[in-house]
Amino acid sequence: MKYIDKRNILKFICIMIIYFVSEVIILPFFDLNNLTTKDEGTITLLSSIINAIILFFIYRKDIIKDFNNFKKNYKNILFTAIKFWIIGYLSLTLSSSIIMKIINYIGNNQTSLESMISANKLYMVISVAIFTPFVEELIFRKSIRDFCKKDLLFIIISGLIFGYMHVMTETVLINYLLLIPYALFGSIFAKAYVETDNIFTSIFMHMLHNSFALLILFLA
């Protein structure tokens, strides 16, 4: 059995380049010398929308196929999504608590996200709860699954790349321990996707998690 599809690795690399370049395209429309946290939230939303449109165009046939499958099997897919989200949430919470106690730090990703949400609630809610899950699941699950056909290898690679993307801005080596909870959570998303072979499983999980995290943040 062919476990790695080299052609789709190139496709994944191209998608990652688009993912990073999308914000660069938007930046000239803002005053970079006086960029506020609110502006950063707006840029995040616009970048998410651009990526969502591009990814929908790239994967439209598979998205439509999975959506039709979701409509037929929504009970099983939603049950699987909720089950794995609970497992993932408990794993993320426990591992994050341990790591944060070791390094006494919550991470640049979390700090930046909380600042942008505080400065631009509406835009960030739309971005975090809707567009980000759609974009990240198509990139870190769908596009990786396309080139990695072996289940366990896919789960590991998907989790590690997902984890790294959430800690890549860290400047202190020990803070990269935060990769562990993010990678673990990403692996659980990947496992749920493998279980149903439907990208809407992990998209729903991601939307549920981000919405729940936003609710906790607003109530805190």
Image: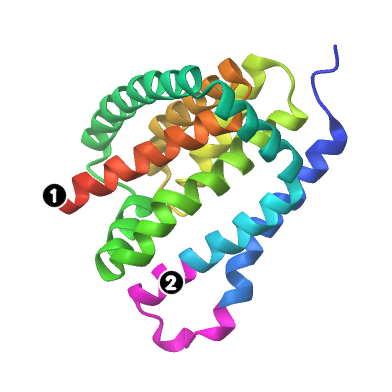
Along the line of sight, the residue nearer the viewer: 40 or 103: 40
Residue 185 percent across, percent down from the top left:
43, 29
Secondary structure at numbered mark 2: helix
Name the residue rendered at 55%, 64% in the picture.
47
Mark 2 or mark 1: which comes first in sequence? Answer: 2
Does residue 78 appear in the picture of this structure? Answer: yes
Give residue 219's mark.
1
What residue is shown at x 56% (from left), y 29% (from top)? 71
Let me know if residue 211 is in the magenta part. no
Magenta: main secondary structure equals helix
The range drawn in magenta is 27-44
Q: Nearer the viewer, residue 47 or 101?
A: 47
Please state the horizontal and vertical placement of residue 114, each as a whole percent of the image. 28, 57
Q: Position of residue 181 (x, y in %)?
A: 38, 31
- Left or right for 206, reference 91: right
User: Could you tell me which secondary element the residue under label 1 belongs to?
Assistant: helix
* Residue type at the position of mark 2: Thr
Q: Residues within 10 Å of mark 2 (few under 14, many from 20)?
A: some
Identity of the residue drawn at 82% across and 43% down: 10
Q: Which residue is mark 2?
A: 42
Q: Residue furthest left?
A: 220
**Residue 127 placement: quadrant:** bottom left
Q: How is the image coloured?
A: rainbow
Q: Quadrant of the N terminus?
A: top right
